[in-house]
Image: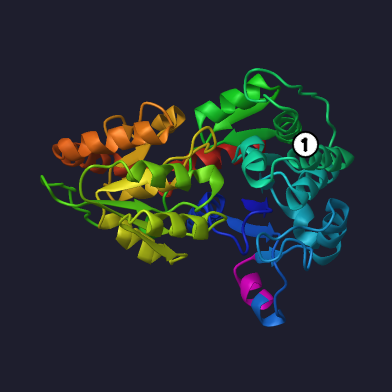
Amino acid sequence: MKIAIFSDCYLDLTGGIVSSINAQKTALEKNGHTVYIFSTGFPRSKRELDRLAKQNIFLVPSCRYCFRPLTPVSRRPKIIERWLESEHPEVKDFDTYYIHYEAGCSIAALRLAKKLNIPSVQVMHGREDMGETNIIPFGFRSVVAFFLDWFHSWYLPHKVKIYRDNYYADNYAKAKMWNVMVNHANCADIVLTPSKHFRDKLIHYGTVGKIGVFPNGFPDEKFPKNPQIKTLKTDEELRMVWHSRVSAEKRMMPFLRALKDVQGKFRLDVYGGGGDYFRAKRFARRHHLNVIFHGNASFETVQEAIMNSHLDVLVSYNFDTFGMTLIEAEAAGVPVFFCDPDMREVVPSGSYIMSKTESSAEMAKSLNNLLKHPEKIEKMSKVMLDHREEILISNRIKKLEKIFKSLI
């Protein structure tokens, strides 16, 4: 098959979506398929563009200065459409369009798929309602959400209207972001989500048609070889690792407040950056917490840190739809700690500790209980190791191939 991947989150970014796309592209190519990636990104030299082109990765028209260097932003969808048809006439020859995210490049792909009568698969990765709430300052959220919804409706039909409710759209801004997500999904032939709980939320708000679950997978070529069972001895330092964004939606600050009340020896290694990075460093220094901030690091460096830890931490709440960090821990046989009950779907039962609520006080209680019962680490680690091969992308990619073939 010849597959075109379109995404606004790929070039110049890190995170779960990027990791997911990379793993799937590699696995599909290994199985003999041709895969192109069209992505938003920051300006590059001709030499860099040529290097990417050899990997079938292409930079679509993007804004030169908007939000630089935080995140690349595409030009208007119609500009991208025209560029694709003139610079890449082969877009009409693909068997399917595999689309990620809901911004300009993704909008252009959905429009082009309809125009060229090419089957489209749309992956809904994230909770944009919570992302907008956590990233945009209070007072601007409703305005930003209104304009995002308005802009989106210029290019794709908004047949569903979502209003404030007592479920997840509990304010105007969130309702508008659900409006974007649901109407975007409804423009595709098939919708995929990484988890059942997110699929159910999309259906609740009006996503219709074929909608399935395709969990993210771990790349075979980076799968740790022969990881050992993790053990924690009484009075030994509990080594924890954080390798998510250091930002409001990932809730680094509530976790650091929890660490203030942990009664026992611990160490937290933090990999990654984000809006709360310097605030978190100041807080940890002020309260003399044993937290080491490493900043952004290579995949290999982070993987080694995971392998050397007892517990992997992901304390977002009502935000993550999958949590790639959790399967990275599973690959290494490392138990995980989280607050969100939805994350129980990602890792096997018996491999995690979940705090009773998302509060700092309850997180501290859970960690104190673990330090009193260190034997739990070994039991959870054994469960992770028993199930870890299930997360290999080579095992999961077969389902995606069947989905593509069903469309063709």
Residue 345 position within the rendered picture, expressed as x and y whole percent measured from the top left: 42, 30
Q: Amino acid at mark 1?
A: Ser
In the picture shown, does residue 139 fall above or below 174? below
Label 1: which secondary element:
helix
For the magenta stretch, what is the residue range? 49-56
User: Residue, x 67% and y 24% (percent of image)?
Assistant: 170
Q: Is residue 370 found inside the magenta-colored segment of the image?
A: no
Q: What's the residue at 78%, 43% (across, down)? A: 144
Which quadrant of the rendered structure holds the C terminus?
top right
* Residue 320 horizontal/vertical position (percent): 52, 38
Q: Front-most of 50 and 343? A: 343
Left or right: 91 with respect to 274? right
Relative depth, front residue between 28 and 168: 168
Q: Is residue 82 above or below residue 347?
A: below
Location of residue 134 in the rendering, given as x and y in whole percent from the top left corner? 62, 42
Give the total of numbered labels. Answer: 1
Q: Which residue is mark 1?
A: 142
Using the image, determine if residue 318 lies above or below residue 324.
above
